[in-house]
Amino acid sequence: MSARKKGITLTIGVLLAFAALVTGIFVAQHMHSKKKIDSSQFHGTLLQQPRQIEQFALVDINNATFDNQNLQGQWTMVFFGFTNCGYLCPTTMSELAKMYHFLEQKNVKPLPQVILISVDPDRDTIEKLKQYVTSFNPHFQGARGDDDAIKKMSHEMGIAYSKQPINGSNENYDVQHSGAIILFNPQGELVAFFTTPHKAELLAQDYQLLTA
């Protein structure tokens, strides 16, 4: 074989070896990024495939629009509740506040955005909602919208709620609702949910497992 042919063969061999190396690195990185969570270690319910949700538009406690864009670029925990709730809402919000504190203590980053969406917009004004959510943690957010917007959004996420008149009065009523916490990834996709009873330690563990 001539020196020229030997040189070409050697060059092709080097290029093929380099291509194989690059391919191997890419595959390794891809496999790592797609690593599956061990469901046996996860206390909530993890969806097999992240799910996009339809467009929505609410108003937050700072009187600004809260929509799908607000779910982008950060992990978000959503809870549907209301400020006049007697037990479920304050209990859940307290556990979320404890969870947030645990994550801060462990210096976990990024911390999740935690937001309460009101299922009682007739009584939950922006001011009332703001006072309520920030009493649990100054970083917590709240949002409200009209009945149609809330019903559409909650139904899509599997959250049920209904007004229950007290003593037959339409003015005096309670709201029965599901107590699940919904988790969105930084792409704004629904990835997991957590049913009652909520425990701050387990919520923190699951969050760390997903974001590690």
Image (cartoon, rainbow, N blue to C red):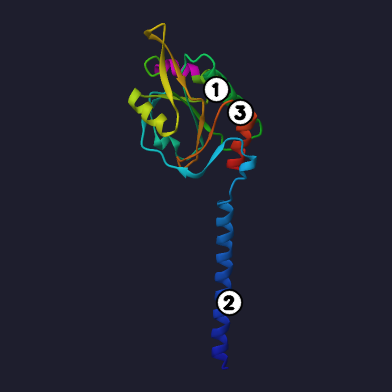
Q: Are marks 3 and 1 in contact (CB under 8 Å)?
A: no
CA gap between label 3 and label 1 equals 10 Å
Circle 3: element type: helix
Relative horizontal placement of residue 202, taking residue 189 as reference (left or right): right
Q: Main secondary structure of the magenta part?
A: helix
Q: Residue 161 appears in which quarter of the rendering?
A: top left
x then y, percent, for residue 93: 55, 22
Name which of mark 3 and mark 2 comes first in the sequence.
Answer: 2
Question: What amino acid is labelled 3 in the image?
Answer: Met
x then y, percent, for residue 118: 43, 22
Disc 3: which residue: 99
x then y, percent, for residue 51: 45, 42
Q: Residue 156 appears in which quarter of the rendering?
A: top left
The numbered disc on residue 14 is 2
Q: Residue at x 49, y 15 (%)?
A: 85
Circle 2: element type: helix
The answer to if 32 sits in the magenta stretch is no
Q: Residues within 10 Å of mark 3 (few under 14, many from 20)?
A: many
Residues rendered magenta in the picture: 124-132
The answer to if 131 sits in the magenta stretch is yes
Question: What amino acid is labelled 1 in the image?
Answer: Met
Disc 1: which residue: 93
- Image quadrant for the N terminus? bottom right
